[in-house]
Amino acid sequence: MVDFAISTEDRMIQDTVRKFVDKELIPREREYIQRDIKGESGFLPLSELRQLQRLGKEAGIWGIDCPETYGGLNLSPFTQALINEELGRTFIKFRFGGTAPSVLYLVNDEQKKEYLLPYIAGERQGAFALSEPGGGSDARRPRTTAVKQGDEWVINGEKTWISLATDADFAVVFATTRAEDGTEGVSAFLVDRSLGWTATPIANMGFDGTSSLHFNNVRVPARYLIGEVNKAFNLAMLFIYRNRGYNLAPKNVGAATRLLAMALEHAENRTTFGKKLAERENIQFMITESEVELRAARLLAWHAAWQASEQQDFRYAACAAKYYAAQMSNRVVDRVMQIHGAMGFAKETGIERWYRDLRVERIYEGSDEINLAWMWKDLQSRRTEIGQM
């Protein structure tokens, strides 16, 4: 039987993160709203991120998914989901320090010294370069190519919608390669920015901070191949399913929780035509319907995280959680804006910022359609039975 009882230790971690968000992040929102109004960047600069990560370390939250070998807490996916839900209660994009993308824990010892350890220490910044123009979520067939020439790989192509690339000094790049036996597949490389790739920021609807990366005959020493030639597809999907299941889905739950609290407070204080909004049945239904959807999304996210913690195949659960939580948060923010009326549309409240930022949740790390298509194949093949938990 699935048991979602939260342990005493997890409660303590959850409470610590909640206090951190309430004290260190939410009070900064007003400043970033004002920056946005002035036309300045609404992002948390790297210098401020590092400062906040140090405060998080002082509070005992450091390396949440990092093995103890490297000084991390090595928390379970379920505990990480609880942390990410708390972080989702603010639109400030923050992540605790002392961690690294999952693929970096799988590189060889020499690569760990050069990339993993400095990343964990906050001395190096990296980007995960998978998505491409026209290719989107099709990770099996990247148009970016890497051709072996002597002791080097020559990379050509373009990546797009890459997060954290503006400040990155290296990227994990996925490219189509050909093995010695003539077979083609996907390989991954550690590529320093100093080798010649460039990044162009993409202006978009929200503040997701993405860029396009350009590779024009970038020559990479052969020792920076990750693992084996043509064997990197699963490395990419490991990163993606982790994000879907117990990173993005819980953050959407956290966002909806905060937004509904704002809606409830506004409804209890706003009077129109002699009645508080909270006394109007249509407003009551908007909030309670949203709260039911929030609970459903939370259980889906917790289920995916629980399966991952139990080392079960959580891919279907991750797709379901990511799909539903993204849909739910977009419905909720729309209702919350409607409840606030014109004030919700104004930048001052921050609701319109949530409205813009949450829209991309239905697109990146697997769009709604990609997740549904993947789940359909699983159901049709009977790899997952209908209603199976």
Image (cartoon, rainbow, N blue to C red):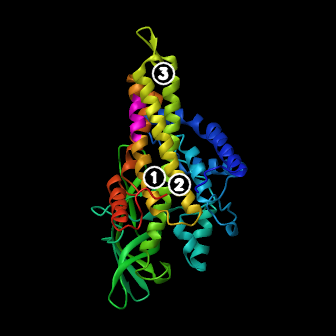
How far from the left and from the top, in percent, is residue 115?
57, 70
> Could you tell me what secondary structure mostly forms the magenta stretch?
helix
Q: Do the residues bearing badges 2 and 1 touch, measured as CB atoms within 8 Å? A: yes
Q: CA distance from mark 1 to mark 3?
A: 29 Å
The residue under label 2 is which amino acid type? His
Using a 10 Å C-alpha cutoff, classify the residue at mark 2 as few (fewer than 14 neighbours), some (14 to 19) or many (20 or more): many
Q: Is residue 112 above or below residue 261?
A: below
Residue to which mark 1 is pinned: 321
Displayed quadrant of residue 158? bottom left
Residue to which mark 3 is pinned: 267
Give the residues in magenta.
330-337
In this rendered view, identify the residue nearer to me: 186 or 42. 186
Q: Do the residues bearing badges 2 and 3 touch, measured as CB atoms within 8 Å? A: no
How far from the left and from the top, in percent, is residue 49?
58, 49
Q: Is residue 204 above or below residue 171?
A: above
Indicate yes or no whether the magenta region holds residue 162. no
- Secondary element under disc 1, as helix, strand or loop, is helix
